[in-house]
């Protein structure tokens, strides 16, 4: 291969794989993961289900991050969004080890007919593309369906993201094939970005993907667990994100011009 494998780094990430968020098992797994002193602890999408993103909600998660002495990336579902109180919001709340709230990433790519409607309804969405400055580098956060698209990782890398943490909801009810298909897109984002990605999936597969698109660590599907990975912050901006993503549009424009020239030539002869 043209891309050499990436060596493990010194940033320790723990990702929780668990689906029944109301059972208390998420807290138990998080306590267990925190005992290993990770630099980041990542929950699946929607792990914290709250009525509102109010002060009490933020304070409770802040205390957990402080008690566990880690950056907490908490996938959260809020029934009432600060953007629009009559709409829910799917987001990830980010805290540092001192419990400081660094902000939230709101899911950008909503699932058609499930999270958004043809007429523009559904979940609230912010236009902001946020990254989060931490003591270990600048983290980019994406949520589940976000990883299916190239634009967000490209834009966040342009904002300085040096690695990516991805809360995801992949329920066991989907079946294995759907979840494996979904997970197969994450290595593409890693190769495009030349960045590490760590994904916390509700029922799997949770995995760490190196900048060469290789799975450096993964958990079996359909069981609880803690994924641990050591990753590196990378600062170089890859050629794909600079100009490579424009290639399909250039090819489309060139093909259109050539077709136009050919049609004109045929028309002139007739």
Image: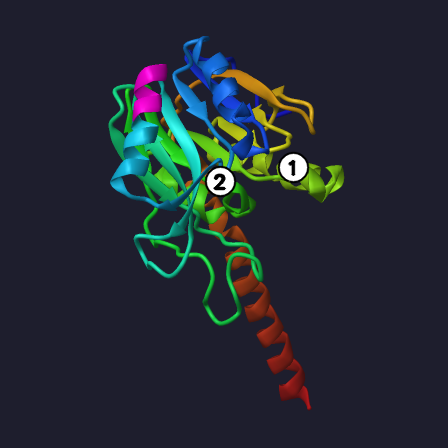
- Rendered view: 39 above or below 152: above
Q: Mark 1 points at which residue?
A: 184
- Check disc 2 and report its element: helix, strand or loop: loop
Percent across and percent down for residue 91 are 41, 43
Q: Is residue 68 above or below residue 262?
A: above
The span from disc 2 to disc 1 (Cα, nearest Å) is 21 Å
- What is the total number of numbered labels drawn onto the structure image? 2
Residue 265 to residue 132: above or below: below
Residue 157 in percent (x, y) is at 38, 37
Tag 2 residue: 46
Residue 211 visible here: no
Q: Is the magenta stretch mostly helix, strand or loop?
A: helix
Q: Give the range drawn in magenta.
A: 63-69
When the figure is inspected, residue 127 is found, relative to residue 189, above or below; the finding is: below
Tell me the SS state at disc 1.
Answer: loop
Instruction: Please rate how many residues cluster around mark 2, counting C-alpha atoms within 10 Å: few if below 14, some from 14 to 19, many from 20.
Output: many
Residue at the spot 51% in from the left edge and 33% down from the top edge: 44
Name the residue nearer the viewer: 44 or 19.
19
């Amino acid at each position: 291969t043209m891309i050499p494998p990436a060596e493990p780094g010194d940033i320790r990430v723990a990702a929780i794989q668990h689906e029944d968020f109301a059972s208390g098992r998420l807290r138990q797994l998080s306590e267990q993961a925190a005992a290993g002193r990770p630099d980041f602890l990542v929950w699946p999408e929607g792990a914290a289900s709250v009525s509102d993103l109010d002060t009490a909600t933020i304070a409770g998660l802040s205390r957990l991050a402080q008690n566990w002495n880690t950056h907490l990336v908490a996938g959260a579902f809020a029934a009432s969004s600060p953007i629009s109180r009559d709409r829910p919001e799917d987001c990830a709340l980010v805290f540092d080890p001192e419990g400081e709230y660094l902000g939230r990433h709101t899911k950008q790519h909503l699932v058609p007919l499930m999270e958004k409607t043809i007429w523009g309804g559904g979940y609230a969405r912010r236009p902001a593309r946020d990254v989060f400055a931490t003591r270990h580098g600048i983290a980019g956060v994406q949520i589940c369906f976000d990883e299916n698209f190239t634009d967000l990782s490209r834009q966040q890398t342009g904002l300085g993201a040096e690695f990516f943490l991805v809360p995801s909801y992949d329920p066991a009810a989907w079946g294995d094939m759907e979840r494996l298909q979904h997970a197969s897109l994450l290595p593409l984002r890693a190769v495009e970005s030349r960045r590490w990605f760590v994904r916390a999936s509700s029922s799997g597969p949770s995995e760490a993907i190196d900048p060469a698109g290789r799975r450096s660590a993964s958990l079996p599907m359909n069981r609880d667990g803690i994924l641990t990975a050591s990753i590196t912050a990378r600062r170089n901006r890859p050629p794909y994100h600079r100009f490579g993503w424009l290639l399909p549009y250039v090819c489309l424009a060139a093909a259109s011009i050539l077709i136009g020239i050919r049609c004109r030539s045929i028309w002139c002869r007739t």
